[in-house]
Image (cartoon, helix red, strand yellow):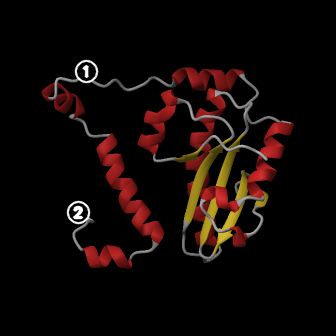
Amino acid sequence: MYVFVDDVNNYKSLSLKQKRDIVKNELVKIFTFSRWNEVLAYLDLPPTQNPDYSHHIRAIARGNYGVGESQAHREFKEFISRNPQLLGLPRSVGRGEVEFMLPSSDVVDVLFIHGHEWVVAEVKSHISDIHDIYRGIYQCIKYQALIEAYQKEIGVSPNCQVVLVLEGNFPENLLVLKNILQVEVIDEITID
């Protein structure tokens, strides 16, 4: 079952974060395997091409991303904070903390603390365009590192999960990036 680890018993005894880290590392190896085009050629399939995402960076630089907050974003963030089950957490976790500030002055949209695990939701409402969702992928990576650093500072064993939560659909042309960077996404959430 755990063919990617040498000692199955040791793997079973690891924390959830340690198990996630092992799986993430293995998936990165798969997604960044340098000889995929040889495998595809052998199977008579077309070669892959690395997508060019530079147009998102230019659009973000030109736009008003990260400046101010829309009513739609505020309402979606509040909705997520009241519904931990949407992130796979039990309802008993209670309401998440909205706009949790980190020592870097970065502010995460919603933070849930469930036992020893901190779960962060970076939310994008239905008005977020593909460029803002692209930005959200990188926000998740940044928040993961910042939360784990903060947990170390306060004497808590680093155990954090950051999820990009979308009211709309996740854009198909960002799927490769999401997979390479191992960002978890939950999309098509409807506010009721």
The percent position of residue 188, horizontal first and vertical second, equals: 64, 40
Viewer-closest of 117 and 76: 76
Q: Is 190 placed left or right of 119 in the picture?
A: right
Which disc is residue 3 wearing? 2
Question: What residue is drawn where x is 13% and y is 28%?
Answer: 42
Q: Are dots 1 and 2 in contact, CB under 8 Å? A: no
Which disc is residue 1 wearing? none
Question: What residue is drawn where x is 39% and y is 75%?
Answer: 14
Name which quarter of the figure residue 135 lies in.
top right
Q: Quadrant of the N terminus?
A: bottom left
The residue pinned by badge 1 equals: 46
Mark 1 is surrounded, within 10 Å at the Cα level, by few (under 14), some (14 to 19) or many (20 or more) other residues, namely few
The percent position of residue 4, horizontal first and vertical second, equals: 25, 61
Mark 2 is surrounded, within 10 Å at the Cα level, by few (under 14), some (14 to 19) or many (20 or more) other residues, namely few
> Could one spot residue 69 in this view of the protein?
no
Kindly report the distance in space between the C-alpha atoms of the residues bearing marks 1 and 2.
Answer: 29 Å
> Could one spot residue 6 in this view of the protein?
yes
Disc nearer the start of the sequence (1/2): 2
Viewer-closest of 153 and 43: 43
